[in-house]
Amino acid sequence: MSRNRSILVLIGVSVLVGAWWAFRPEKLFINQKVNEAAPMALSSEPEALYTGKLEGKIHQTSGRATVYKSTDGKEYLRLSDFTTSNGPDVHVLLLRAEDKALGGEIVKGELDGVELGALKGNQGDQNYDLPASVDLNKYQAVAIYCERFHAIFGVARLERF
Amino acid sequence: MVRMIKGGLAFTALAGALLLQPTLRAQDNMKQDSMKQDDMKHDKMQDDKMMHDVKAKTLETGKFHGKVHATSGRATVYQEADGKLVLRLTNFKTSNGPDVHVILVATTDAMDDANFLKDNTDKLQLGKLKGNEGDQNYEIPAGTDLTKFRTVSIYCERFNANFGAAPLEKF
């Protein structure tokens, strides 16, 4: 009788061990943290903070907008693989991500944004300095904005890099 | 008198059109080759170049999504100066689990509802997941066709489960 029992216990234990090995349930509660350095001399290079894809349908706009922090601490916006339609009086702005103007094509009324300067070119890679005081937690969208016609050519929503 | 007014109107219209037109045609292309350094003296262009005279290039990036096994963070593919490709996970978090690997998948994205990867999907092993939290790097074998492998997956081999996926987009 006690022999039968010990066989049952043995089977039970091995089933439990097998199940534990397969599912490793303790891992649900145990975290394994790592913190590897960037794979190169990235520390001596500008650090990407935020990035987003530029999109615009009516005034075909594409490319990428990335906010970098240079080694001296200055922040700047870089447009890469960039194309938009050329137009009069086009500017680069930072806007609030929840700004309703971003959804529409024509802006009615005033925009609450940070002016970064006149668009340097409608194609190609280009950089814009950010004012030191700019709050990137508040302004999380980049807009290519034609001031003369209050038209939004393209928008990029910035996400943490 | 009427003729003069007409003339004036026509002139104004023409001037207005001229004011708006030229910029529409001219494509001020300012593509800058950031990899080369020649001694250009244009101050602004030089500024733009200097900041990006980099040794390593960012090729692709994408955000992780995964609900069943909450997965978040970013996957970025870098090319080092010697041509080596490196996958880096940043701000990364997933659920811990048994036998979890980082793989490249030959799809544009792996959706949450396709939690279990199909057998016929091409997969490329990058290695065991080093940690379920934190920044980490994985070497991508030389000759990997990144036009084919467009998705990074955190893949539990034991259960053929996709914990999370990051669709790659050109940086």
Image (spheres, coloured by chain):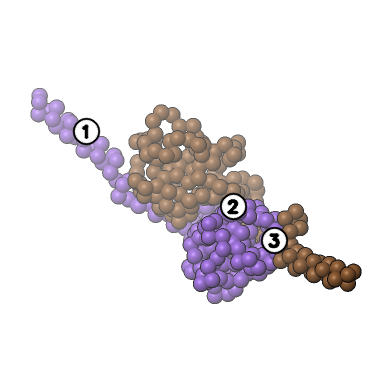
Chain colours: A brown, B purple
Which is nearer the eye, B153 or B134? Answer: B153
| Residue placed under numbered mark 1 in the picture | B12
Q: Is residue B135 above or below residue B127?
A: above
Q: Is residue B5 above or below residue B98?
A: above
| Residue placed under numbered mark 2 in the picture | B67
Q: Nearer the viewer, mark 3 or mark 1?
A: 3
Whole-number angstrom distance, CA of label 3 to CA of label 1: 73 Å
Label 2 crowd bin: few (<14), some (14–19), many (20+), radius 10 Å: some
In x, y percent, where is residue A46?
Answer: 61, 53
**In which chain is the residue bearing label 3?**
B
B125 relative to A99 in the view: left or right: right
Q: Nearer the viewer, mark 1 or mark 2?
A: 2
Res. B17 image quadrant = top left
A109 relative to B114 in the view: left or right: left
To the question of a shared chain for discs 3 and 2, the answer is yes
In x, y percent, where is residue B37?
Answer: 53, 62
To the question of a shared chain for discs 3 and 1, the answer is yes
Q: Is residue A58 visible?
A: yes
Q: Earlier in the sequence, mark 3 or mark 2?
A: 2
| Residue placed under numbered mark 3 in the picture | B97
Q: Earlier in the sequence, mark 1 or mark 2?
A: 1
